[in-house]
Image (tube, rainbow, N blue to C red):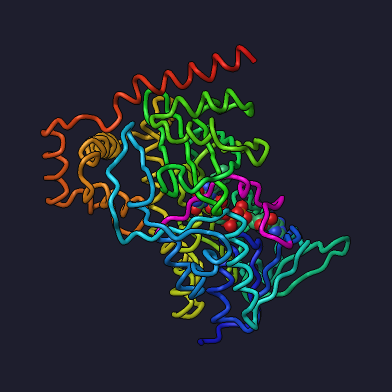
Amino acid sequence: MKRIGEHAVVIGASMAGLLAARALADFYGTVTVLERDAFTVSDIPRKGVPQGRHAHGLLARGRSVIEQFFPGWTDEVVAAGGARGDIAGDVSWIGHGVTIKSAPSDLVGLLASRPVLEGHVRRRLLQLPNVRAIENCTVQGLVAGDDNAAIRGVRVKIGSSEEIIDADLVVDASGRGSSSPAWLESLGYARPEEERIEIGIVYTTRVYRRRPTDLNGKYAVVVAGSGPNWRNGVVLYQTEDRWIVSIGGFFGDHAADDELLFAAYAGSLPTSEIYDIVAHAEPLSDFVSYRYPANLRRRYEKLKDFPKGYLVLGDAVCSFNPVYGQGMTVAAQEAALLQQCLEAGDADLARRFFVAAKDAIDVPWDIAVGNDLRHPKVVGPRSPKVRFINWYIGKLHMAARNDAELATAFLRVANLEAPPTLLLSPANLLRVIRGNLSRAKPSHGADRAGRVSDLSAEARRAKAEA
Ligand SMILES: Cc1cc2nc3c(=O)[nH]c(=O)nc-3n(C[C@H](O)[C@H](O)[C@H](O)COP(=O)(O)OP(=O)(O)OC[C@H]3O[C@@H](n4cnc5c(N)ncnc54)[C@H](O)[C@@H]3O)c2cc1C
């Protein structure tokens, strides 16, 4: 271990903050994580992370980075009721209206509820001898040195008492609602430029009883919205006897928190698998919903001046349309990059970290925003490159209905395990061309046109009769 400083403070004990604290623990005498919530005794959703009530899929890359930070973490989550699965072999993936071919792969997935994933990371982190957490502790502002060139600590409120906590480094991992832009401005720095791509997504979620025979033993179904109805849906294994179902669409086209209308919405998706759970499994929770207005990226790497002793990461830097399941993985990648940056000391740390994080964010940002821009109402720059990629990925999906190797290559990229250029390799280009020339029958085109509308009609009829 290379000691860089005595004390590092992290604002926020959600996924980004916990993983950043793990990286910092190798370089600072003490790491203190400040969290405005109290931690729950069991792994259930908490107020500061309201998205924890909704389906969270962990990409293969995120699992492997977290596993490197905490060896044995995957096994611990499985022992607590989660499932290790094959992301290509155990999941139905539906994009561009078609199901891509499923086959065994080396893409390891880990399925458990969001609070369980976070709870296991937190407990492992707090076993480190030099890490501590302060609960019910709200950070209210930064404390800067005399000329505001460096951050020296934070002002906090713990219960009703206010105090200052000194630190050599402060890391803001307080999520999308981060106050860093305002705090920096109050110290005379520019706010970071913000990119916002409005999508108006609403998730509606319910937990159902799982039977082992559901979905023919598969662990998940993921529908990424596509025209004409642009609706998204996901069913994920939570425990042996629980599914979580989250469905929703763009610009207010959301699923109602009503049994029959929810089923009707599920029935309008381009697979009957989600409807089959919603219509037939026993509900184990009320409906909950979450409004997600826009993809949001703060360009800290473009700031010319930035105080020493301060960093921002996780959703506080970039928050992605949740449908693509990227947030926790990007937070983990950023924590790993922070660790690498610290290996070289803390000179010019903020600039080095923000530039490295930018490179890690670019790909998932382009995947999320690029795909969202297929929706005609989403406003944003549709460069020729974006149009070509969206056209090509549509063709790739058509070919991947019957081509497991191509389907797995797509999932490797979507899981941030390989660069997008993999999909344009000569071998994969050939597969796309061959697959489109062979005019194979749609895997469930008939389903889409016929059965799905039957299912919606069936649910609406039932609602009218009720
Ligand atoms: C509906 C929805 C579904 C999602 N699905 C997925 C998915 O499938 N896969 C995936 O990888 N990601 C998903 N995400 C994103 C994922 O939840 C986040 O990327 C992930 O939690 C990392 O966020 P974070 O730690 O940066 O911030 P957050 O999770 O928002 O946590 C911020 C933490 O900071 C604390 N805090 C805030 N302000 C203060 C303060 N002033 N003082 C002290 N503490 C403070 C909060 O209490 C909280 O604990 C989804 C998001 C949403 C909204």
The reply to whether the magenta stretch includes residue 353 is no
The reply to whether the magenta stretch includes residue 48 is yes
Dominant secondary structure of the magenta stretch? loop
Q: Is residue 175 visible?
A: yes
Q: Is residue 282 above or below residue 354?
A: above
In the image, 98: left or right of 324? Answer: left
Q: Position of residue 374 (x, y in %)?
A: 36, 31
| Residue 435 location, quadrant | top left
Q: Residue at x 48, y 20 (%)?
A: 456
Q: Position of residue 174 (x, y in %)?
A: 63, 57
Q: Quadrant of the C terminus?
A: top right
In the image, 157: left or right of 207? Answer: right
Please state which of residues 213 and 174 is positioned toward the viewer in this rendering.
Answer: 213
- The range drawn in magenta is 41-60
Q: Residue at x 61, y 12 (%)?
A: 465
Q: Is residue 273 above or below residue 181?
A: above
Q: Is residue 180 visible?
A: no
Q: Residue at x 43, y 35 (%)?
A: 273
In the image, 7: left or right of 296? Answer: right
Q: Residue at x 65, y 77 (%)?
A: 131
Q: Position of residue 462 (x, y in %)?
A: 57, 17
Disc tally is 0
Q: Position of residue 245 (x, y in %)?
A: 54, 40
